């Protein structure tokens, strides 16, 4: 076997190894992205047509009277933190759980000398708690805008928590791996598939043209 044949054989063997690795990374990243890609694709459509999808929010309002001892504790705390944001004292957190099954956690509340207001934003809705210090009147309101609104907020990472935000970052990295390995696989097969680069170029050209001509 000539030196040229040996070099060609070695080159083909190296090419086969790289192609095998690319295929492996490509299918693994696609498998890990499968459910996330499906979710983000569907919610991309619902977000794009949000104004056309009617959602009737469900609002629940509840009232109660906080115990005098708790109100006194909250009032003293409010006088010390007037205009500040700080979590509720432990006693207030337990009372909310016992009264309305509301878990305040370590969310910051807005304090004044007259009342404490606790915003409870969530995916697909909103909620809040207010406790007045003059009469101990407590109000709780919970708004649910439906599952489509919930999915849209999940898509945007709005009020979804740190764990989901980490998932979005990881999902984005996996999508990059999927796209880059796919592009490199196209490069390996382009010589035998003449329409590879025209189709890839068209896929890049169409959104650029639409953006330049129709986004103002």
Image (cartoon, rainbow, N blue to C red):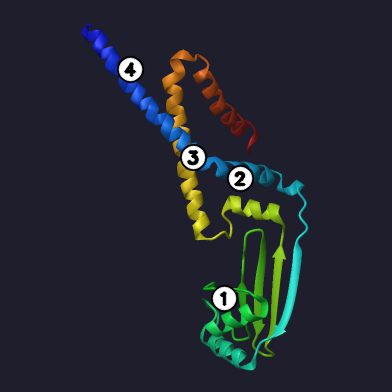
Identify which residue is drawn at 52% across, 55% down.
164
Residue lying farthest to the top in this orientation:
2
Residue where numbered disc 3 is placed? 175
Q: Can residue 116 be seen from the camera position used here?
A: no
User: Quarter of the image containing the C terminus?
Assistant: top right
Mark drawn on residue 12: 4
Secondary element at image label 4: helix
Please name the residue shown 72% across and 59% down the image. 145
Between the C-alphas of marks 1 and 4, the distance is 65 Å
Q: Is there CB contact under 8 Å for labels 1 and 3?
A: no
Q: CA distance from mark 3 to mark 4?
A: 29 Å
Closer to the camera: disc 1 or disc 4? 4
Q: Label 1, on which residue?
A: 109
Q: Residue at x 59, y 73 (%)?
A: 103
Q: Earlier in the sequence, mark 1 or mark 4?
A: 4
Could you give the CA–CA distance between mark 1 and mark 3, rounded to whole angstroms? 38 Å
Circle 2 sits in a helix, a strand or a loop, which is it?
A: helix
Q: Residue furthest front?
A: 1
Disc 1 to disc 2, C-alpha distance: 33 Å
Please tell me in which quadrant of the rendered image residue 20 appears: top left
Q: Position of residue 141 (x, y in %)?
A: 71, 72
- Location of residue 105 in the rendering, given as x and y in whole percent from the top left corner: 54, 73
**Marks 1 & 2, CB-CB < 8 Å contact:** no
Q: Earlier in the sequence, mark 2 or mark 3?
A: 2
- Contact between marks 1 and 4 (CB within 8 A): the answer is no
Front: mark 1 or 2: 2
**Circles 3 and 4 in contact, beta carbons < 8 Å:** no
Which callout, 3 or 4, points to the residue nearer the camera? 4
At numbered mark 1, what does the secondary structure look like: helix, strand or loop? strand
């Amino acid at each position: 076997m000539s030196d040229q044949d040996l070099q060609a054989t070695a080159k083909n063997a190296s090419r086969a190894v790289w192609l095998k690795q690319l295929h492996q990374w490509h299918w693994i990243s696609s498998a890990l992205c499968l459910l996330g890609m499906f979710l983000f694709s569907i919610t991309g459509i619902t977000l794009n047509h949000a104004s056309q999808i009617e959602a009737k929010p469900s609002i629940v309002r509840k009232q109660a009277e906080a115990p005098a001892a708790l109100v006194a504790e909250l009032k003293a705390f409010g006088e010390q933190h007037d205009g500040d944001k700080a979590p509720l004292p432990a006693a207030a957190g337990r009372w909310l759980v016992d009264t309305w099954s509301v878990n305040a956690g370590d969310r910051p509340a807005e304090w004044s000398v007259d009342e404490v207001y606790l915003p409870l934003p969530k995916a697909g809705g909103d909620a809040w708690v207010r406790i007045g210090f003059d009469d101990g009147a407590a109000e709780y309101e919970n708004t649910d805008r439906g599952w489509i609104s919930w999915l849209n907020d999940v898509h945007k990472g709005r009020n979804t928590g740190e764990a989901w935000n980490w998932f979005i970052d990881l999902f984005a990295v996996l999508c990059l791996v999927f796209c880059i390995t796919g592009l490199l696989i196209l490069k390996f097969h382009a010589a035998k598939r003449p329409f590879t680069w025209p189709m890839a170029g068209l896929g890049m050209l169409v959104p650029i043209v639409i953006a330049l001509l129709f986004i103002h």
